[in-house]
Image (spheres, grey):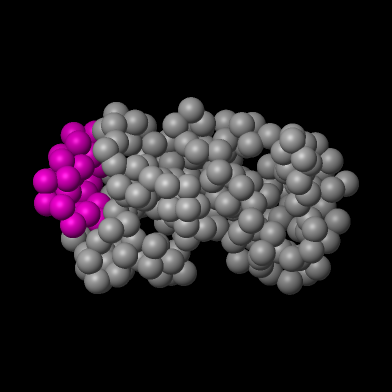
Amino acid sequence: MKKILVVEDEPDIRELLGNYLKNEGYAVVSAEDGVEAISVFSKEKPDLIILDIMIPKIDGYGVCEVIKKQADVPVLMLSALGEEKDLLKGYDSMADDYMTKPFSMPVLLRKVSAILRRRDGSSDAESTSPAVICGDLTLIPDRMEVLVKGEKVEVTSREFDLLLTMAKHPGRIYTRETLLDMLWDYNSFVDERIVDSHIKNLRHKLGGDYIETVRGRGYRIGQ
């Protein structure tokens, strides 16, 4: 049974989320502020976190950054903040997805299911895959490792999937829509800017110009 940590300071919303998730067969643990969230995460080791941004003590952005340094657990952020700068800040903090309040519970449940399914599927599919070499980049799927000129670079599982997809076909241009459909599996419910945010993070970690922007079309890794 998959375990989900719900971090929400409003009791009614926290209870509503917990009940819906339990009805879908998930185990649920909860926290009402940022400090408690980090503590519960360390103790319970959930498979996914639903994280409200406007919570006391440590906000959701801070909680996400702390947790992502400890483990590559998927994070779905919730917030009443719906402006573009808030969405991008959520993606830059390495959240896997973002929903604004008020939100549709069926859509949230579909997102949760898709995130977990993708995580499980990617581990099974890549367990015996050979290394992918693209210039100075080497990707080792069974260990989810990225090497740049022989030096290991730490990336999240989503970043690894994104890089591996493009590295398998160097020179091929991938639109945002294509990447969403291949890697998120629910592209009609996720903002395209999440792709841009992950690309930005990868460029920062990898250095150099490994990922090219093809204006008006998408992204590619050079041949």
What residue range appears in magenta?
6-29
Q: Residue at x 39, y 36 (%)?
A: 111
The correct choice, above or below, for 1 with respect to 136 in the image is above
Q: Residue 147: x percent and y percent?
A: 73, 64
In this rendering, position of residue 152 left or right of residue 53 = right
Residue drawn 23% across and 39% down?
Answer: 21
Residue 76's x, y, as percent? Answer: 38, 48
Q: Is residue 130 above or below residue 181?
A: below
Position in image of residue 176 (x %, y %): 63, 36
Q: Quadrant of residue 55?
A: bottom left
Choose between 144 and 197: the one closer to the eye: 197
- Residue 8 in the magenta stretch? The answer is yes
Location of residue 200 by image quarter: bottom right
Q: Is residue 78 left or right of residue 222?
A: left
Residue 208 in picture, x, y percent from top left? 79, 63
Position of the N terminus by quadrant: top left
Residue in the image at 81% along x and 68% along y: 149
Whether residue 78 sits left or right of residue 147 in the image: it is left
| Residue 91 visible, this angle | no
Mark yes or no: residue 135 visible: yes
- Does the magenta portion include 214? no
Total count of labels? 0
Viewer-nearest residue: 168 or 18: 18
In this view, the residue in front, 125 or 25, is 25
